[in-house]
Structures are given as structure tokens and as C-alpha cells.
Amino acid sequence: MAESQSFVRCFSSFVARLDDRLPEVEQHFSGECSEEDMFSYFWGLQEAHECLVLSVPETLKSESSAVTYRTRGNTLYRCKNLKEALKSFNFSIMFAPHPPAPSTAASSCEEAPANGTPAAFETLALAYANRSAVMFELRQYEECMKDVELAILHGYPEASRCKLLARKERCVAKRKEEGGTTERLLTTHQHFPAIATADPASPRRSDAITLSHSPEKGRHFLANREIQPGELLLTEESYSSCLLPEFLPSHCSVCLTRCLTPLPCPCCPYVTFCSSKCRSKGRKSHVAECRVMGALIPLPSPWRVALGILTRVTLPRLKIWLRKLKEEEQEASASLSKMSAKTKRQGEGDGEGGGGKMKEERETKKQERKKQAEAEEEEINTNRRRKREKAKKKKEKKEREKRLRDTKDQNEVSDLQDEEKEEALYKAAFHAVTNKSKHSPSQLLHACAAAFCLTKLLEVGGGFFLENDMPFTPCEEEAVLVGATLLRHLLAAKCNAFTIAEVNVPSSRAARPRPVTVGVGLSPSVALFNHSCSPSSFLTHCGGGVQALTAARTIPPGQEVTIDYLIGSRGRSAASRQSRFLSQYGFSCSCDACARDRPAYPRLPDYADVLSEDGLLRRPGSASPSSAPSSPVCPRLCQAKEGFDGLGIDLARVPHKVKEAVSRYKDVLQRCQDAATPSEADLRTVCDLIHLLDVHAQKPSSLHLAAQLTLEDMTLRRFLHAEIKDEFYY
């Protein structure tokens, strides 16, 4: 998403104010500088405080807006335009003044009673009542009854309550009469897959992959064994996520699933939730951004993801955790520097030549022995410090375990465990790769400006800088701490955030099911996978904020497991991909597809085109059908037959096996057009074809690509899809 016009104007004004000083200012921004040094310098620029001030639209509830939406909804309801009437009543509920959200559910309808005078929240009550009428007309009786309860709970006028209660009684009668056969307007199907062979040390990760490290690739995952197409490799909940602006009114801001009758945020008119459970879960981080949501919504999604990473943590916890993280980083850096210096000294020693005066040689050796003694002493001291630190951590662990054993209050035990879990999750998000060294000074200056604006918004919002639940103005040290942390998260989100999609299926199957990108998120483990323009795995959303990683093709042992960072990489030329990578991620892609300058697929091949008899086994750039080979069999099959006998491969049957697999694939595609959820057998058929082509086909192959994209589409539909009645389909 493009940056908000407000920020663009502010940043342009800031750069103009710097004028001739800009080159001098940019000298303070480089990959060698720490986030603290860069942001501290930026915070000290008077021009930043004068120019980088984002306008904050009014984000409070508005009774007049709620009444306007309700009036419009009533007009649409009388015209029998129920879809638009429902939207208007939802907006009326979002804008209507609302009582504070409860800490726990207070009633069967999951809302707190409206405190104060009965008329205090009458606008909200009337909107709920009107929405219940729409839901009754749409024969959604469960939702209708919930809205009736919410209307009464929030002070619906006593004189008219008999009408609402009568509607509720009719709902009960209709449900009994129809026996639960009423067609649902929206049915969200979620499937949380289980990993067949999980890693004992990490139950949400398959034992088929292992984390590795190299100077060229950094941290990455390798296959431990041969991984089959369709095999589940990882499931992880997004640490931070956000909806695209257009989906805020219709989707839950926590689990990112669509809901027809959402619950509003009690304080702002922008955010909705599917249930009180999600509202309670999201309130902890949303409270920091609630009053400034109007300014945050137009900002790029990765910025909001970065802010979400920070606001999951309270300021006191952030100070403690950052101190620990910085100490760990310093120790790791010192250890790395020491190893580098030792290697350098050894190299210099190996490169010394003979000759020279004896006295100089003795002096040189004396100095070397002295340095070696100092290095050994330093190593001894370092080992002592490590032992002390290890003993300290062991002692702290024992003390924690003792507290857990001695604590009788189970809630306290749970809180301690939750805090340790949150600390571990934040630590993983904090260490996500930032590619800081690959950004230019102007890009880092721009990122600092973004972090500066977000820090200012947190200060204005009054929900993050809290002391005894009261907002305060942060001192410079606290502002720099938060701003530098935001800068780090912004750089990490820019190169690690991924899109989140759902599949919408019309109930009549009149339209083809299609994925829709609804949001953006960041998961620490997913961030460790490197990119390839011809990825070996793909990411899908399972609902509830959970992401799943599935193998797209056969992955041999020792090969890296990769994902596609860009949407539709395979539809771009190599030059276009490289340009995008350099601007967004700060690196040039060196995957096999880019190294070989593979041709771009201008569009997803239409099934009819891919499955034409002549085009079926053709490869991009191959000869015409008349002169093309009759099968996609790899040239290595032309080797001596004896070499394949041991593998059980009948060379004569390979083309026939491929054609049989493709014939079954055609049948699967036909069934997929009619079925919302693909069957296990159909998934297996597609996986078998991919494996067969992995072994025998030359690449790139349009059929091989089409089968992988089909597997991705089927997996997404299997894990999460929303079945929607035609008139509500979009």
C-alpha cells in the first residue's frame, strides 16, 4: 500500500527544511550505526519535531454518525436491500457510543451491562435492534437473537421491548420449525492441521527440516530427508498482523476472519471483532493505537505490523527485555570479534617470511608471546564471566521453579508461564533479520522518520506510555528507547512481513472460488525461510492468526526449503523481480530461476490452455507441437536402462504414467470447480503428479507450475475458506 499523503507531505517538508544539510545529516545513517545512535540523532533534529507531525483525525465515537448510518439502513431495509442495510447498521454500531469493554463475559451475549442512565447508550441499542430485524429477514435466527439480547442489554426503550421479545420468540419457533436446516449466509470453515512427524524440541515444526546457518544465507532451513509434495512443515501463529483498511469493518482484527455481525471496539469506530474472546485478546495491544487509528490506517501495512510487535509488550517489560537482549547481543558480538581477531593473527603468522635481523625477530616473537598471553588471559576471563552468567541463569531458573512449586495460586503460576512465553516470542521477533547494512543512508533516514512519527503517535494516543494506568509524556531517553526499537521492527517488517489471504466460495458455485488478500502479518519462524522465485514451499492462512507452511514439490535431503516473498513472482520477468527485491528487501535474488533468467509466466495458465493435448507436455520455449518431444521425460532417462532397473522405473511406461497422472489431474480440476473443500484423495492425486514431474520432467514446465499452483489453491481452501451466499459474495 502506498504511504499516506500526510506522511509524504511531512517528509517532503522535512527534507526541504534540511536543504543543504541533507548530505551531512545522511552521514549519521548507515549499516554500521546502531538503531539507538541513528534514532537518537534523528530525535535531536529540530526540523523533525517541526515538520513530522501527522494529522490525527477524530477517532472517538460519534452519535450523529451512528444516527445517520441507522437512518440510511432503515431506508435500505424498507427497500428490501438487506445486504446494504446490514452494512449501514454495522457502521451505526461501530460509531455509536459504547460502554467500556468488560474484562470477562458478563452475559450469554458476551457483553457488559450498560452502566449509567438507560438512554446513555440508546443509539447503540437501536442499531442492534435494527440489525436483528435484518438478520430475521435473512433467516439467520441465532444472530438475530444475539442482537436482541444486546439491544436490551444496552438500554433499548422499555416501551418497545415487547416487539423485540416477540421477534426473539419467532426466532425460537422458526428454528424449531426448520429443524436447523436454514442456509447460512456465511460459514467459515477452518482446519488446523497437525504435523505428522513433529520435532520433539519444537512440536509445531516437522522433523523433516532443520535450522542451519551460513555467512552467505544467514539462518535458513534445510531438508533432513526427502520431503514429499503437500507435506506440512510448519505451523505458527502470527506474532503481529493487521487488516488491509478496506477489510476493517467486515473482518475481525485479531483472527482476521470475516464476520457478518461484528462486535465493535468500545472506544474507536474503526476496529471490529468476531467475538468477545477476540476482543479481549486484541484489547491489550489495540489500546495503544485506539485513539490514533485514524492516522494509522492510511500508513503502509508493514508499519502497522511493526507497531503491533511493540504494543504487545508493556513499556516496563520492554525496558527489562531490551536490557537482556542487548547484553546477549554484546556478548555474541564480542565473541565473534575475538574469533575474527584470532583468525587474523593466525593468518598473519602463517604469512610471515624469513630473513631480517635476529634482534628484530626476538622482539617480534616477544611481542607475539605477550599478545598471546593477553589473549589467553582475556579468554580465561571471558570463560569465567560465562560461567558466572551460566551459574546466575541456573540460579534464576531454580528460583523460578521454586516459585512455581511454592505458589498455591494457580493464576499466578499461569501468569509466570505466560510472561516467560511472551518474552521468548518477543525475543524471536526482535531477532528477525533487518538487512540494515543493505539499506542506503536515504532509506535509513526515511525509516527513522517513520519510527519518529509512530513514536509521536504513541505519545498522542496515551495508551502506551503509562504509569499506574495514567498516560505520561516520555522523557528523551524513553522516547529514544521506543523509537529505536520501532526502527528495528520497521526494518524487519519491511523484509519479513507476508500477506494473509482467505478463499471466498459462493454457495451456488456460480463463480469460481478465489483467494483474497485481507491482511499482512509477521511470524518469527516463517521469517527464517529464504526467498526463491521458484519456491519449494508455500504459506497459507488457517484462521485464528495461524500460518501453515507446506511443501510445493519434492525437496531432496540437504536442499534449502524456500518460500516466495512476492505475490506472483513467477508472473514477473527476472529484471522486474530484481528491481523489486532491491527496493523492498535490499538484496539481489540469486535463485536458480534468476540465475538462468527463466521466462516469466505472464498469467496463471488457464486450466483449459494447460490441459490441451498438444500443449500438455510442452515446455516454455520448446519447439512446435509437431517437432516437440512426445513426453516431458528428462534426458537423463536416455541413459542406460540398467541404471534405472534398480529404482523400479520402467522407461517404456514413463510417458504413459505421466499421461495417466495428467488424466486424473483433469478430473480433479473439474471437481475443484464444484467443491468448496477438496478431498484428501484429490490432494493426493495432485501431489502424485507433482512428484512424478519432479522425477521425470524437464523444468521449467508449465504443467509442473500449474500443478503446484493448484496444490497451493487446494491447500488454502482446505485450511480456511468462507462459504458465502451469492448475494453477499464479493
Image (spheres, helix red, strand yellow):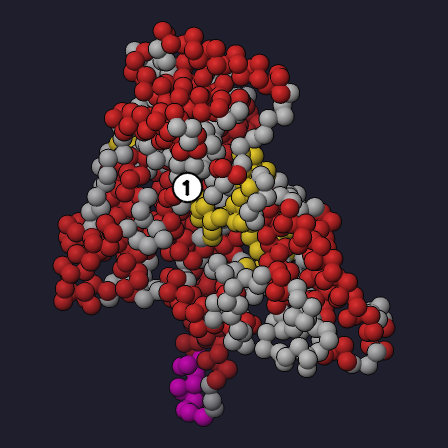
Compared with 409, 697 (above or below) is below
Residue found at the very far front of the displayed protein:
79
Image quarter for residue 24? Answer: bottom left
Tell me residue 64's x, y (percent): 25, 26
Magenta-tinted stretch: 355-365
**Horizontal and vertical percent for residue 110?**
47, 21
At a point 52% along the width and 12% down the height, the residue shown is: 169
Q: Is residue 79 visible?
A: yes
Give the residue number, with chain letter if any, for mark 1: 247
Q: For the point 43% across and 18% down, which residue is it?
A: 150
Front-most of residues 508 and 272: 508
Residue 364 is covered by the magenta coloring: yes
**Picture layout, residue 330 above or below residue 596:** above
Disc 1 residue crowd, few under 14, some 14–19, many 20+, Cα 10 Å: some
**Is residue 635 a member of the stretch shown in magenta?**
no
Q: Amino acid at mark 1?
A: Phe
Name above or below for residue 299 compared with residue 31.
Answer: above
Asked whether 142 or 506 is in front, the reply is: 506
Image position, residue 592 (x, y; %): 56, 72
- Circle 1 sits in a helix, a strand or a loop, which is it? helix
Number of callouts: 1
Q: Residue at x 75, y 66 (%)?
A: 658
**183 on left or right of 517:** right
Q: Is residue 198 visible?
A: no
Left-right relation of 178 to 599: right
Q: Main secondary structure of the magenta part?
A: helix
Taking the spot 74% from the left edge, 57% from the top edge, the residue there is 664
